[in-house]
Image (cartoon, helix red, strand yellow):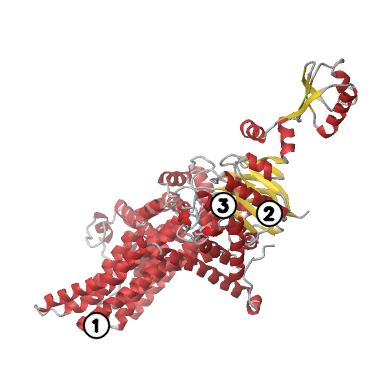
Amino acid sequence: MEVLIHAENLTKQFIANGTQPHTAVSNLNLDVPQGEVLAFLGPNGAGKTTTVRMLTSILKPTGGRATIAGHDVVTEARRVRALVGHLTEFPGLYLRMQAREYLDFYGELYGMSRAARHARIDELTQQFGIADAANRRLSEFSKGMRQKVALIRSMLHSPRILFLDEPTSAMDPHSAKQVRDAVAQLRGQGHTVFLCTHNLYEAESLADRLAMIRKGNLIALGTAQELKTKFLGAPRIEIQLAKPLGQPWSAFTQNGLREKIRVEEFSETLLRYRTAEPNVTNPHLLKKLNEAGAEIVTVSETPQSLEQVYLKLVEEL
Amino acid sequence: MSEYAFAAPTAAESRTPLLAALRETVREALVITRRETRDSLRDWRILVPILILTLVFPWIMNFTTRVAIDFVEQYSATIIPIRLIPFGLMIVGFFPITFSLVIALETFVGEKERNSLEPLLGTPLSDASLYLGKLVAATALPLLASYLGIGAYLTWLYVTLQYVPDWIVLLQILLLTTMEALVMVTGAVVVSTHTTSVRAANLLASFIIIPMAFLLQIESVLLFWGNYNVLWFIIGALIVVDLIFIRMGIQTFNREEILAREVDEINPKRLGAKFVNEFRVNGKFSLRALYFSDLPRILSTNRLPILLTAAVLCVAFVAGWLYAAQFPMPPSLLQPLRVQQDFASNAAAGNMTFLPQINTPAIFMHNVRTLILSAILGIVSFGVLALLLLMVPVGIVGFLAAELASAGTNPLLFLTAFILPHGIFELPAATLATAFALRAGTSIISGTRRGERGGFINALADWAKVFLFIVLPLLLIAAFVEANITPRIAAFFFGG
């Protein structure tokens, strides 16, 4: 699959008069293929916005390089900016303008024809449920509606790659769901989405992979499950029986599963263990228990949240 | 690939990418200008005062003019109304353009403060288009109001007094108004790039308003004086200032500079620390390292301003010489140079009252004062006045040498006796001090990016280092030679 976002030792240092250089992003290496939603997580000041600004050709890297759909972010900056859609952290709207007029202005900046602009504005305002308000001044819009206008602005020119910085902040649950649906729809259409968010539920539910950045360094990259396994350990499974087994648990966990299971706790009717390969281990173990006539009440995975991973990485590393 | 990357270039433009780029820049700038102008027209806080200044103020001015004319004509002072009307034209034109400063600060730094600039920076829009579009938008509306105000005032004058203005003066006032509006807007951009809030920008705007107020007073004097030709020089100077500010604006109003600036950049304490830090070599003060490492590096990297200043020095001497050839002194006044025998002792005793006292401390302090003043003027004039001030004494020496030559004195002998002994030390000192003042002055408009070496603080520190550790010792030696040795040599060669 084509890599649409490629960063290679991407670095950004800011030099202020009379102070030491501040490294906002340090040697970032990242590949995002077409159609992937990548959630970019990190605490405030971690370097998320600076990374996005470099990848959208707004700021120039001071080290390394990056390409967007094969175009260098420094030497082909205009082309890169034409290729991407960028939802900024703050909506930054012109409140004296009408929504339609505002979007039309941005469409013109992207070189869209009048007919194309009008059709696209109609389509997107309809999709986000603000078509009826399109001729109202933006100053009359609620926070959520303003965020929707900003999102439409970033999608107006049908970009292949979208950089979304906190797209659902300040939105009510219904509006936030609309945005999440839109992101899911974009992924379905083959768009690549680079999603900066503090909302871990949103990140886990929308993203194919997650990247975590702290003090300018990429500290983790992978699927939610991979990150949980890597930083919280293998999934923890709990088996509850209706009545005690006639034989020790080891009779089931030793034979053929010894290397794959790490028992953490057990009693006559309870077994709690970790396994890195639940797809292989669990069916095998349950089959054995069934054959031994065990009355299984529940088999459940103890939830490991992304928040635990996030906090562990942010606080401990 | 995005469906709407760029507007398609025409066949001719495909052959000439520069033309296509220019067309695209203008197209984008016009989109920005249209939006900003529309935005300003929707803001009653801008529109109402402009309308008042355009429609009501000219009428009041006309009324005042008529009252003033009626009053002064009682005393047959007819010249006063003749001079008063162009002044009125200038005032009527100036008031509306003051709004250009407000609009410019709002459109440049206000957008930054409201976070509406970053979405714009994320579009394919070039930095130049954005700058140009905003520049035109901030200038056009107040300027249009100003022209309308002038038109309304002239119409009233014609209706009530049948006054028809001299078209040259009218043209001058229109040009002055236009250039002043541009100076305010381009100056506002420079101010905006150093701030992150409208409040800070408004405070810094006094650096634009105060010079403009002075300029208005000078123009008023010229208009009442009736010395209209001098206005052309002011128009020329304003054009130069406009060009300098536009260059500075283009250099600093770009994505990198706008977004990298998270706090108000002008921090005297931090700048002071940076200046002091420039005197450290490898983190510590060391006179040895300064003389053997830092100063040679500074001199080597500043060859261009040093050579340029030396060249200007030569030009000044030649110009002085040629000036003497063009305007020779009457032969009756010219005599071969003779110096009295007691010249040296008189000079040392301070008996030659028409000259500064000729002793080491007096000469030294005089030269130090002159070169420091030259540096200050050089900085505020972007280097120009530092060079001009150096040219004056050297030009006078050239002039004298030429006049003396025509009177039969050997000019080389004159230079050897009167200039060379202390000049060996003084001329390099003056050249170095001027060269580094020139660099400090030009560094303001050179558009050096933040943090890069070559900025104003670097240049100022280099000037200070060269001045303290090279120029001052040279001036001290030169002063001693000039007070004690030069008079004796002069007396030896030219003693009567």
Estimate the x, y position of residue B403 in percent, counting from the top left: 33, 75
Whether residue B195 is visible here, answered yes or no, is yes
Q: CA distance from mark 3 to mark 1?
A: 56 Å
In this figure, which residue is indicated by the disc labeled 1?
A: B158
Amino acid type at image mark 2: Leu
> Of circles 1 and 2, which is in front?
2
Amino acid type at image mark 3: Thr
> Of circles 3 and 2, which is in front?
2
In the rendered structure, are the residues bearing label 3 and label 1 in contact, judged by CB atoms less than 8 Å apart?
Answer: no
Q: CA distance from mark 3 to mark 2?
A: 18 Å
Tags 1 and 2 both on a single chain: no
In this figure, which residue is indicated by the disc labeled 3?
A: A88
Q: Secondary structure at mark 3?
A: loop
User: Which of B265 and B155 lies nearest the eye of the viewer?
Assistant: B155
Q: Residues within 10 Å of mark 1 (few under 14, many from 20)?
A: few
Estimate the x, y position of residue B114 in percent, counting from the top left: 47, 53
Amino acid type at image mark 1: Tyr
In this figure, which residue is indicated by the disc labeled 2?
A: A186
Parent chain of label 1: B
Q: In the picture shown, does residue A29 fall above or below A269?
A: below
Q: Is residue A51 left or right of residue B285?
A: right
